[in-house]
Amino acid sequence: MIQLADTDADVRRMRKAAFRFLMGATVSLEFGMGLQRGVFNNFVVEILGIQPGQLGLVQGIREIPGLLTAPLAIVSGYFRENVWAGVCLGITALGLFCHVFASNFALLIVATLVLSVGFHLFYPVQQSIVMKNSLREERATHMGLLNSGGAAASLAAFFVVIGLAKVTQRPNYGLVHAIAAASALVGGLLVAARRLEGTVAPGKTAMNFDRRYMSYYVLSFLGGSRRHITMTFAGYLLVRTFGTPVSTMVLLSAISSLVAIFTRPLIGRAIDRWGEQRSLVFSYAIVSVLFASYAFVKAPLLLYAIYVLDQGLQGFDVAITTHLGKIARSEALSPAYAMGSTINHISGVSVPMIGGYLWDLAGAPVVFLSGAGIALASLIYSVTLERRESLARQAL
């Protein structure tokens, strides 16, 4: 009995250590990505002279690796998951460092592609590691803590960029990108150096579409559709329709990150306590009202509050991740998360295009009412989630 207790204590210590290393890797990545995002628009305008059409092409190319997450992740089967996570962050660091030498549009495309491959491949394996190194009742809490740490790192990077802008009229973009690359590389070394429990054995194929996980795939697609409407059109609405200045948009982004730092762990604990079904139904009920508000509210200050609340509620997407953890075998998690990321990015490519067409054809309210419809469809689907979980577990 004493030996069993010692073994249980050892397992708990290993899990806590694994989470600390993964948190360190995530914070390092998000700090580097925050630096890159903070200077990106000024970099491409002031240094490269990018035109609007070229910028749209860059952003579209940036999403292509997301569509290819599942097939690209095949090679992950030949690494232990912590080593593969380190490789992904190494690729991300290389992409960030390539920006140091991106002196023209073609080199910017190369840097963007390398960077996008790295971080798109990292997030599915990050989720898999959390699921395998957490007790079932604390998975969402741990995901919330990771998201909170990432938001804090992004906010810190934002203040670094603001500080550099105050010191010099034009920061040294090469130095900023080099620091960002070094930060991502440190994260990769952190996670790769730590042996984690439940990692995938060498030679395991990492691409898989399993019908038993269809509920996860459907939720990933619907969640991605909702998220990309917010990402593409919510801020655009504030600027295009209400003339919101850039200083206010930056402030809203900072407030959203600050809110995320405190709310992500709370949302994670709520998911662990309520369960995925109740959490998603609650979230989508509010989101449907928020989308309708985007369509009809005309008071800018109220819309600012709606924008921040909408950003905060995205933390409930963790419930989609933990839902898969309840219905999938341990060895199937990483492939399924990679497939879910690919499905999510199908909406990432299609929703902005369709939404832009609807905006031009019928106006902004139609776009956001469509978003409300997607949220309601997600709510209706989530109502039966516990029954779907039970059926999926029976099929294992």
Image (cartoon, rainbow, N blue to C red):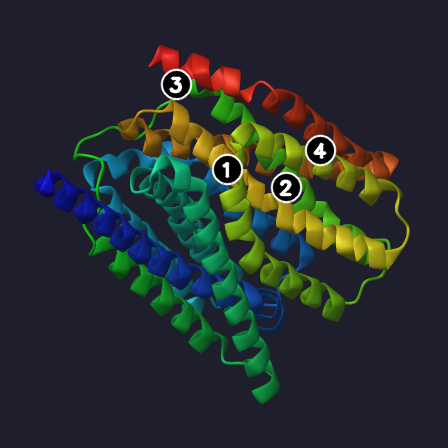
Work out whether mark 3 precedes mark 2 in sequence or the reverse, and give the earlier one.
3
Residue type at numbered disc 2: His
Q: Are marks 3 and 2 in contact (CB under 8 Å)?
A: no
* Residue matched to label 4: 285
Marks 4 and 2, the one that precedes in the sequence = 2
Give the number of callouts. 4
Left or right of 267, for residue 82:
left
Q: Nearer the viewer, residue 215 or 1?
A: 1
The reply to whether callout 4 and callout 2 are in contact (CB within 8 Å) is: no
> In terms of sequence position, does the residue under pointer 3 or pointer 1 come before the other?
3
Of tags 3 and 1, which is closer to the observer? 1
Question: Dot 1: within a 10 Å radius of its alpha carbon, few (fewer than 14), some, or many (20 or more) residues?
Answer: some
Question: Of all residues shown, which one is farthest toward the front?
Answer: 1
- Of residue 86 and residue 3, the one placed in the foreground of this image is 3
Q: CA distance from mark 3 to mark 1?
A: 28 Å
Quadrant of the image for the C terminus?
top left
